[in-house]
Image (spheres, helix red, strand yellow):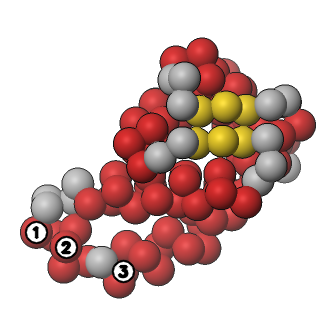
Amino acid sequence: MTGLLLRWLINALALLALPYLFDSIRVDSFYTALIVALLLGLVNAVIRPVLILLTLPVTILTLGLFVLVINALLFWFVASFVEGFTVTGFWPAFFGAIVYALISWALSALLTRS
């Protein structure tokens, strides 16, 4: 349980770092980052596998790179209905999702060493 809460906090902190790296991404508060991190986790757990399965031929043709497009679209999708979290377009969502994943991975690696 504490591992799940720690990962949630790490993801929220990763989201808070994005506005410092991209002018086109805005996160208003830590509370907003917590909500977005929770929703991104739920969307990635429920909707992402279905989308990957439905787009499997395209994903195979692009050698897996289409998964980055799916991640960007889901990142942008969450931003479309969470007030206080703004992503201005597809390309900011694309690069924001990549950097978000990298920051989250790096923080998780540093903080959850066992």
Front-lying residue, 108 or 78: 78
User: Relative to residue 23, is residue 87 depicted above or below?
Assistant: below
Picture residue at 54% right of the left edge, 31% below the top: 24
Tag 1 secondary structure: helix
Q: Among all residues in the image, which is located at the extreme left?
A: 61
Measuring from the top left, give residue 107's x and y in whole percent: 60, 23
Q: What residue type is labelled 1?
A: Leu
Give the residue number, with chain letter if any, for mark 2: 58
Residue contact between numbered discs 2 and 1, judged by CB atoms under 8 Å: yes
User: Relative to residue 98, is residue 4 depicted above or below?
Assistant: below
Tag 3 secondary structure: helix
**Residue 61, numbered circle:** 1
Measuring from the top left, give residue 52's x and y in whole percent: 37, 73
Quarter of the view holding residue 51: bottom left
Tag 2 secondary structure: helix
Query: Which of labels 2 and 3 is toward the front?
Result: 2
Quarter of the view holding residue 69: bottom left
